Image (cartoon, rainbow, N blue to C red):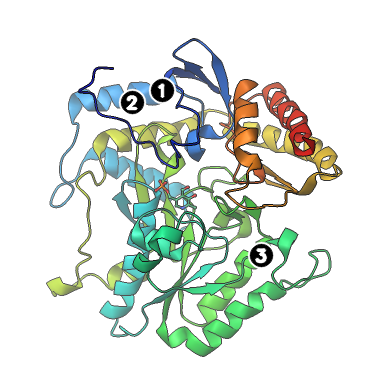
Amino acid sequence: MSSSDLHLWHPFTQEGADPAPLVIRRGQGVFLETQDGRRILDAISSWWVNLHGHSHPAIAAAIAEQSARLEHVLFAGFSHEPAEELASRLGKIVPAPLRHVFFSDDGSTAVEIALKMSVQYWRNSGRPEKCRIVALENAYHGDTAGAMSVSDSSPFTAPFDSLRLPVLRTYSASCAHCPVNLTRATCHIECLEKLERMLAERSHEIAAVIVEPLLQGAGGMIVHPEEFLTGIRRLTAEHDVLLIADEVLTGFGRTGKMFACERAGVVPDFMCVAKGLTGGFLPLAATLTTDRVHDAFTGSDRSRTFFHGHSYTANPIACAAANANLHIFDTEPVFESITAIEKVHAERLPAFAAHPFVEDVRHIGSVAAIELKVPDAGYLSTLRPRLYEFYLNRGVLLRPLGNVVYILPPYVITPRQLGDVYDVIRDSLALLSS
Ligand SMILES: Cc1ncc(COP(=O)(O)O)c(C=O)c1O
């Protein structure tokens, strides 16, 4: 590095306390290889994006081929074959009423678009007073201003409270810390009653409810009962409020079905997808919606237009990567691998549940979480950096969310490799007694 080189400012990184970033030179399957030749098992799919392993040759080849043909063209007034193919492929896997797709760049932009579309939908429909959004406790929807507003208050959002839009907040079905002090075995999802009252009293001013369906990710890998999601759908339909399903994390098989909404039999008014859309190769996102929403934007009146877009909307190379990713779902036994992962979670978690330092264990599809008992629970728990370092020293990339250790692996992880990850987590529990 010469003195004229710029300094790299990394995300979610405290330079004054965190170790220096590891330089990675290769990625292959579940492994990352550092500049000095160490292999690290990526047990969190590089921030939940990778599906079929690093550097999957079919996606790499599709990117190379598309780059040599058409790298980019603006998407206003123009279209291209990779985007059209992707729309057709997505149309076959999303709930049937979602007939329209608006592309953007990442999870946060997919969420911003759903929020803006839902508000403008009501304005275009002659009901501009329906402009408020309801979101859940423990929610995380991204880091841009709108996405950060619907995310719950946390150390991530605290410096920006003055920038966050006012949002109505309702309970999350966080069964390990039930917001209404009940137990799942005997409850009737009473945590929904707050939303029920809110919608009964205020639906005239509410545009949409936004949820992470079945699994709240950054809030602590919180798994919701399916009845919670189906209840939200029932209530929003009854009160004529739109439902936004943020499937940025849950999409593309993470919960054991292609989408969490499919698992619960729910059809939302908007679905946001990103992360796994390109198999973890390139940034690309999509916000999908219904005829009802789309048709409120069309007509001869130009003021009804959805005035939103990004320079790289529907980038052809990213679309080609997404098409290759979805082709892998058609041609490789991806869901069998996910079932094998879920089986290991089900086998290994009970021993953790019985451990005196463990507060709760939970899993859904390929994702598992172990919540540890600490005096300073939360993202800034002092245990977290010690765990992170311990795991890296043992050759495993795990980034606990505070005192919640979670596994979210690429689907190509073998049961034996996953067993090794569990062994490392088991050994790390000794840190709680030191
Ligand atoms: C549920 C959910 N929505 C939105 C986002 C934001 O996505 P991105 O980081 O691609 O902007 C994330 C990121 O973790 C997420 O988990």
Tell me what residue is drawn at x 13 percent, y 71 percent: 302
Q: How packed is label 3: few (under 14 Cα within 10 Å), some, or many (20 or more)?
A: many
Q: Can residue 365 be seen in this snapshot?
A: no
Residue 92 image point, x, y percent: 44, 48
Location of residue 227 with respect to 335 vertically, above or below? below
Residue 393 falls in which quadrant of the image? top right
Please, what is the three-letter code of the amino acid marked with disc 3? Ala
Instruction: Name the residue at the bottom extreme.
Output: 201
Task: Check whether the beta carbons of the residues at disc 2 and disc 1 lie within 8 A of each other.
Answer: yes
Left or right: residue 57 compared with residue 333 = left
The residue that disc 3 covers is 173
Q: Which mark is residue 58?
A: 1
Residue 225 image point, x, y percent: 69, 60
Tell us which disc is closer to us: 3 or 2. 3
Secondary structure beneath disc 3? Answer: loop
Of 156 and 70, which appears nearest the observer?
156
Task: Check whether the beta carbons of the residues at disc 3 and disc 1 lie within 8 A of each other.
Answer: no
Residue 141 image point, x, y percent: 46, 56
Left or right: residue 25 compared with residue 303 = right
Residue 297 image point, x, y percent: 25, 70
Secondary structure beneath disc 2? Answer: helix
Q: CA distance from mark 3 to mark 1?
A: 39 Å
Q: Is the CB of mark 2 within 8 Å of ligand 1?
A: no
Please tell me which of labels 3 and 1 falls first in the chain: 1
The residue that disc 2 covers is 62
